[in-house]
Image (tube, grey):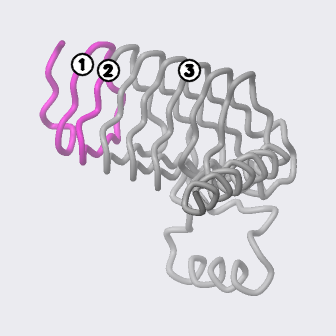
Amino acid sequence: MMKMITIKLYNKWINFKLRFWDVMQKEKCITGNSTNLFLEAKIENLCKNKEKIRIGDNCKIRGELLVYPHGGEILIGNDCYIGEMTKIWSARQIKIGNRVLIAHNVNIHDSNDHPLDKNERHNHYLEIITSGHPKIIDTLREAPIVIEDDVWIGFNAIILKGVRIGVGAIIGAGAIVKKDVAPYTVVVGNQNNIKSL
């Protein structure tokens, strides 16, 4: 009897914690109906504008969504899944269509995140650790990313700036995508191995 009461109390605590976290994370973005931000989810809206991270209906988010203070926008369609430890970081714009499945530990970045010049990179690092992310950066290379409807991205994949992934494409586990992917193709490895579905 006591064990059953303990289990019920524990379950109530977990449910409360999940609801609280969901509400706290949703303060930093706009979400559609029936969208959940799980305990592993992290919304880093460094520009403090909720409009810059928009998530559609019926999405399940377990990864990290980050927009920089100097720019960036993340737009996620309906019925999408973002897996644990996935990082979607935007300095320009990342647009994800409907019914997109993104596995765990995927990295999607629309910029270099740091300047290429060693001195600028060091100064950028110092500014981040002393004052936080800068509001103006003109030394980053940025280009938008578009991931169209019905794409599946396997675990540990890396999607780099400026690419468009076509409708229904599959990005295999561990793949590195640095150029556009045609609709209904499969990418494995470093994008030298592309097959039609």
Q: Is residue 2 above or below residue 38?
A: below
**Residue 142 shown left or right of residue 57 in the figure:** left
Instruction: Say which quadrant the N terminus sits in.
Output: bottom right
Relative side of 140 to 16, left or right: left
Q: x%, y% of residue 46?
A: 78, 58
Task: Using the image as rendered, state which of residue 132 and residue 84 is in the foreground.
Answer: 84
Q: Quadrant of the C terminus?
A: top left
The mark that comes first in sequence, 3 or 2, is 3
Residue 192 drawn above or below residue 10? above
Q: Earlier in the sequence, mark 3 or mark 1?
A: 3
In-image side of 63 versus 75 (left or right): left
Mark 3 neighbour density, 10 Å: few (under 14) some (14–19) many (20 or more): some
As shown in the figure, which amino acid type bears the numbered disc 3?
A: Asp
Q: Is residue 70 covered in magenta?
A: no
Instruction: Tell me, for residue 79, which label it has, or none.
Output: 3
Marks 3 and 1, Cα distance to the nearest angstrom?
A: 21 Å
Could you tell me residue 176's position as x and y percent? Answer: 29, 46
The reply to whether the C-beta atoms of the residues labelled 2 and 1 are less than 8 Å apart is yes
Q: What residue span does the magenta drawing correspond to?
A: 169-197
Which label number is shown at residue 169? 2
Q: Quadrant of residue 73?
A: top right
Splitting the image into 4 quarters, where does residue 136 fall? bottom right
Q: Disc 1 residue type?
A: Thr
Q: Nearer the viewer, residue 150 or 70?
A: 150
Q: What residue is disc 1 on?
A: 185
**Quadrant in which residue 169 is drawn:** top left
Residue at position x 65%, y 43% from top? Answer: 37
Q: Badge 2, how many Cα within 10 Å: few under 14, some, many 20+?
A: many
Badge 2 or badge 1: first in the primary sequence: 2
Q: Is residue 188 above or below residue 49?
A: above
Secondary-structure class at tag 2: loop
The CA span between labels 2 and 1 is: 5 Å
